[in-house]
Every structure is written in structure tokens, then in C-alpha cells.
Image (cartoon, rainbow, N blue to C red):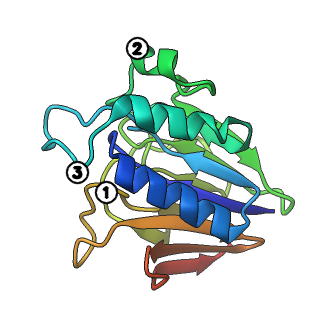
Amino acid sequence: MKLFFASDLHGSLPATQRVIDTFLDSKADHLILLGDLINFGPRNPLPEGHNPIAVAELLNQYAESIIAVRGNCDSEVDQMLLSFPIMSDYNIVLLPTGQKLFLTHGHIYNAEKRPLLKRGDVIVHGHTHVSVAEWQGEQIIFNPGSTTFPRNEGDRASYGLLDETHLSVLDFEGNILNSIDL
């Protein structure tokens, strides 16, 4: 199973198009969206190419491949534009290894505020716009960074991939920013 992770699109049509193009090129089985899909929020500037309706229409074309969670900037009004559910604060993917991927945006659950998980489970979140792929205590913390307002070193927009038992964060030029084996 191959999974593609993206977070914090914030309604940017160019960023969303780049995510979709890269997702399709990756041949991943599912596109996991970690929240803040349509709205840019009061603390962020207006993103390049902000077009919430076009972003929703583009994402809806891939609804059958999307697993999503709610971000702090997502609302019930945003859900009305989307044909896949986004209002859950978390979701869980069970891997063939028996490990859980605990999917969340990061404003409720994160590395500091963890749900009860087993050793080796993975907390996957966005929200901070900073990519991470590392063991922290008993769990792996994985954050693909942001596609629209990156706060990585060099401010490079990024996404994540799970390929069997390897998690990677990559920029859109294909450079690996962080990686870890499960």
C-alpha cells in the first residue's frame, strides 16, 4: 500500500493542482489530506491563487481516493463544497504491519498531546507547516509540512509518502527532506 500525504492547502489552487499532479505521478493508492483545505485562516496571508470553489471542485474529482480530517480552519460550510468527509478530528489507518497511522490535523492531537497509542504507532499531522519524520518517545511523529505556507528550512513546500514501511517527506522537486523506516 502506498499513501500520499498533504496538509494545509489553505485554498490555493496552484498548490492543490501541484498536489494532485504529484499524487497521480506517485501512483499512490490514497491521498490523505490532513486539514486546512479551503480556508486560509485569520493568521495567514491570502495564499497565491486563492480559489476555494475551484479547489473543492478539483479535490472532488478524486474523492474516491481521499481520506481527510478536519483542520482548525475547516468548517461545516467548507464540507458543503466537498463530496468526501472532512469533519472528523482524526482517522485511523491500520497498516499490514499492525501499526496504526493516527491521522489528525495537529491542533487537537500532536506530538505534545498524544492519544493513547502503542509503541511504534505513527501520529500523522500537519498544522505546524514544518515537516517531521522521527521517533519521539514511543511513537513516530510524521508531518508532511505545508503545500501552501511552508515553514521548513528554505520554506520549501512539501508532501509525504508512505511506501510499504518507509515514510518520507519530499519537496515538489523530489528532494527528500525527512525520512524514517517504520
The mark lying in front, picked from 1 and 3, is 3
For disc 2, the neighbor class at 10 Å (few under 14, some 14 to 19, many from 20) is few
Is 51 located above or below residue 47 in the figure?
Answer: above
**Residue 77 circle label:** 2
The crowding category of the residue bearing disc 3, from other C-alpha atoms within 10 Å (few below 14, some 14 to 19, many at least 20), is some
Please tell me whether mark 3 sits on a helix, a strand or a loop: loop
Q: Quadrant of the N terminus?
A: bottom right
Q: Helix, strand, or loop for circle 1?
A: loop
Q: Position of residue 71 (x, y in %)?
A: 40, 34
Instruction: Specify the label residue 48 is tagged with.
Output: 3
Of residue 40 and residue 133, the one placed in the foreground of this image is 40
Q: Quadrant of the C terminus?
A: bottom right
Identify whether 119 is placed above or below 87: below
**Can residue 69 be seen in the rendering of this structure?**
no
Residue 151 drawn at (x, y percent): 24, 64
Marks 3, 2: nearer the viewer: 3
The front one of 154 and 107 is 154
Q: For mark 1, what is the residue?
A: 129
